[in-house]
Amino acid sequence: MKQKKMSHNFYDFCVELIESRGVKIREIAEVTYGLQKPYLDEITVDDAETAVRAVIHKREAQFAIMTGLELDRLSEEGMLQGPIADIIKEDFSLYGVDEILALSVVNVYGSIGLTNFGYLDKAKEGVIKEIDEKSRNPDQVNTFFDDLICAIAAAAASKMAHQFT
Amino acid sequence: MKQKKMSHNFYDFCVELIESRGVKIREIAEVTYGLQKPYLDEITVDDAETAVRAVIHKREAQFAIMTGLELDRLSEEGMLQGPIADIIKEDFSLYGVDEILALSVVNVYGSIGLTNFGYLDKAKEGVIKEIDEKSRNPDQVNTFFDDLICAIAAAAASKMAHQFT
Amino acid sequence: MKQKKMSHNFYDFCVELIESRGVKIREIAEVTYGLQKPYLDEITVDDAETAVRAVIHKREAQFAIMTGLELDRLSEEGMLQGPIADIIKEDFSLYGVDEILALSVVNVYGSIGLTNFGYLDKAKEGVIKEIDEKSRNPDQVNTFFDDLICAIAAAAASKMAHQFT
Amino acid sequence: MKQKKMSHNFYDFCVELIESRGVKIREIAEVTYGLQKPYLDEITVDDAETAVRAVIHKREAQFAIMTGLELDRLSEEGMLQGPIADIIKEDFSLYGVDEILALSVVNVYGSIGLTNFGYLDKAKEGVIKEIDEKSRNPDQVNTFFDDLICAIAAAAASKMAHQFT
């Protein structure tokens, strides 16, 4: 890849991708804040937003976000072929590639994010719940999106734990 | 390692290790059952127990269990040296090696177990809660134990999902 | 996903996907055989082929193979959008999603496969070398394919190690 | 864990642990340099040493190093009990917990380190080879040490790739 191509600002692109699917960075920050508030008394939602933005600045996270959301888009536009088309479209419960991609985001600040990721993905708190409801709209595919949002929120919580402990 | 040494029955040893810390295999099965009952109507606690025992038969799980519980024992007996002694004894919140070992158990039946693992570790349901309470007893160290029990229950839930879907 | 759709025979589909890109299952088996021969005297290439086919029967492996090769196809056909299009097309050296997907195949038989996976990916032995050369053809994208083949060969080697030790 | 205890300087402690087993940070840097020189023309061994030290400053790496080397020490001193005692002492080929701990170091700079880690672990280049030979001395246990050194060298190579690309 030529240096020039590298100048793509992946951070801005990822933020746009996320917001174009109806989730604001501030909303992810609120989920992160909710996770860490019981342990870190002094933090604010602004601190959480700073942490969320730091996660999205990490290349490892950017690659996972761009790849996963491209698969969601291709699924929505009916461009996937073979059995994987239905598996992704219907978010088949045994399909784990979405969790694997999310894991690579969670790991950006170490393995302690695993617990928060799993909890969010199952408990569907805050904005995660709204995504889950949207994805019942048959035109929208959020197979990767919901796991990625949980992963970003969880990784940001890990960052705050490392920073404020 | 000589073939003869391989004849150690790791499964029986792991079951004993777990039960000697006050958790019955049946209790782990009840956690697994609670996780999967909403999705798999026809399952029983007996099915869940079969799945839990299958997890403990897997070598990858056995190695993680034996290594983690040996670290908990050495910590209880004051045999760990250096900063890691306090980190493990007090289950330092940023220490993630327990999560990593647990992850290698969760992955035994694929990445879909991640969500259940994280959920259990945070929501502290059933027997997991009791372990958590015991670990406030300063003589007992359950730094690895609680994550491993969550991981076994979560992996067994994945196995049931694969089997009954 | 309806039960009927589940009847897709993912195994046959994955074998076809791999062979349509010019790699025979037997060739992957030869790589696996080369890895394990020094340690396991009695094994044959047929044993290795059995192990390779067992890997491709695992759902976790099938999902990774189908997802990765769909991304390679979409890249070849110019259907990817945004910065990820160039990243995948040119197999950008910092892009790690291909390694992550491969890791989920490697882990199918436990973490001991990691070493063989990394070795193959770098040393480019046997059929892996040919894939690497093909991918200099600008019409072909093997960003995910080469890592997946290394992962299948490495996982099969782990299976043989578990089976024959 | 009290704030005071946190003041343990884990970095210095980890460097001492590594050097007390006969490996100099400079020697790890030479392995990293050897890995990246073919791709990054302008780098020096000093750059590589800076990258190696940065890896050892990461908490995730420190926890893995301290835990793994404590297990090696306890094994040398005959303090491990149960089947895990022989498994670790003899570096049983199917035991994968050492690879898992190493993976958490490799991941500190993203998944692209996987390939270099596996390659080093198998090809036994430079200082890795010397460790491997030492571990044939029955008094020394390097089950975790050799994988951790490979992981540190590989993670440092990833850091350089991210930095200089």
Image (cartoon, coloured by chain):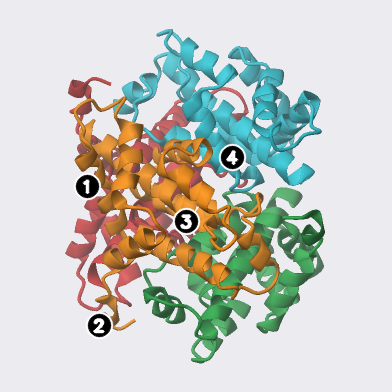
Chain colours: A cyan, B orange, C red, D green
Q: Position of residue D160 (x, y in %)?
A: 72, 56
Q: Amino acid at mark 3?
A: Phe
| Tag 2 near tag 3, CB within 8 Å | no
Q: Position of residue D103 (x, y in %)?
A: 54, 58
Q: Position of residue D63 (x, y in %)?
A: 64, 61
Q: Chain of mark 2?
A: B
Give a yes or no on whether discs 4 and 1 share a subunit. Answer: no
Q: Which mark is residue A106?
A: 4
Residue for badge 2: B4
Q: Residue at 52% of width from left, 23% of height from top? A: A145
Q: Amino acid at mark 2?
A: Lys
Nearer the observer, C81 or B115: B115
Q: Amino acid at mark 4?
A: Val
Q: Earlier in the sequence, mark 1 or mark 3?
A: 1
Q: Is residue B38 above or below residue A141?
A: below
Q: Which mark is residue B145?
A: 3
Q: Chain of mark 1?
A: B
Foreground label between 4 and 1: 1
Give a yes or no on whether discs 1 and 2 share a subunit. Answer: yes
Q: CA distance from mark 4 to mark 3?
A: 23 Å
Disc 4 crowd rating (10 Å Cα; few below 14, some 14-19, many 20+) is many
Q: Chain of mark 3?
A: B
